[in-house]
Image (cartoon, grey):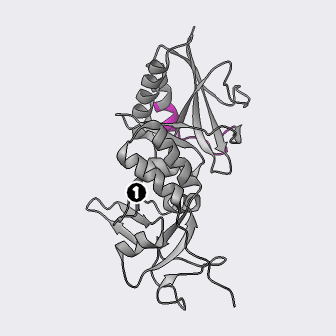
Amino acid sequence: MAIPQPAPTNPDLVRAMQTVASSDDAPARQTLYTAFLQSTLLVPINAAEGAPATGWQPVEGETNVDFVVAQDDQENFALFAFTDEDSLRAWKAEGSRFIALSAKNLFQIALDMDIATILINVAGPVVGGELTRWEFQALANGVMPAEQGDEGAAQMTIPPGTRVAFGPLTQPASETLVVTLKNALAAHPAIRGAHLFEMQVGDGEPQRVAGIEFEGEPADAEIERVMNALGQAITPALGEDEFLDFMALGDEDAPPVTLDAETRIYERAA
């Protein structure tokens, strides 16, 4: 008879969450996101047919799982996740059913379910928090969120040593998005040109990226300002669950993708 494995406890993630709770700065956030990507979380589910009444539920193959979700007044959905069994019992002391999922798998499931936020250790007792959609979407693709600006544009960084692949779009962008993006690019004299291509980080889903060529060598603050403005400008042209990332292209850090007429979307007239 198989011996049940103990439920995960995720001590590194708990410590990282405690650090952010006491001092929420950029290094602490990066440590937190790294800990999430290395964690296995407990996720409550509703009873599956033939499954035990409570406790850790085995899931094999293509088994359908009915996750426990919450909904707010704006009809946004949230998933619950817990770092350990004590935290789950603090939320629901009796009758809990749960499965263990790697955080990265959970993030992808949350995207597929159109979840707005993931609530971590919602009842404590030691530490709790939440991941917003822009955070777990980045993490699902192996990208580290850096911060979110006032305009709603999120900065993200790729961990050193991560495999990154580039290529032309496999699905063309909508005409509305292309026209809106071109108009937004033309509004910034600092932009010399732009390309539209796909980027895949690790084994994540390919992401659509606009690579921006700047005149000269603008300061980081100017690049950030322009990227935020571009993100704000194209948001109304994006469909539901559609995203567009921006990347500054330069001589030293240009991506290894053939930047030619196939990927070029904009070039400022001389």
Which residues are the magenta region? 168-180
Of residues 252 and 270, which is closer to you in this image?
A: 252
| Residue occupying image coordinates x 49% and y 52% | 136
Q: x, y percentage for residue 218?
A: 51, 14
Instruction: Find residue 27 and report its horizontal and vertical position in percent.
Output: 48, 38
Residue that mark 1 sits on: 117
**Where is residue 232 shown, x and y percent of the image?**
39, 33
Vertical position of residue 145 compared to residue 130: above or below: above
Whether residue 214 sits left or right of residue 68 in the image: it is right
Quadrant housing residue 62: bottom right
Against 241, residue 10 (above or below) is below
Asked if residue 154 shows in the view, the reply is no
Residue type highlighted by circle 1:
Thr
Q: Which of 221 and 190 is in front in this view?
A: 221
Q: Does the magenta stretch include residue 25?
A: no
Quarter of the picture containing the N terminus is bottom right
Position above or below: 138 against 246: below
Magenta stretch: includes residue 170: yes
Q: Which residue is drawn at 49% across and 20% down?
A: 220
Residue at the top extreme, as displayed: 270
Give whichever of 253, 119 is nearer the camera.
Answer: 119
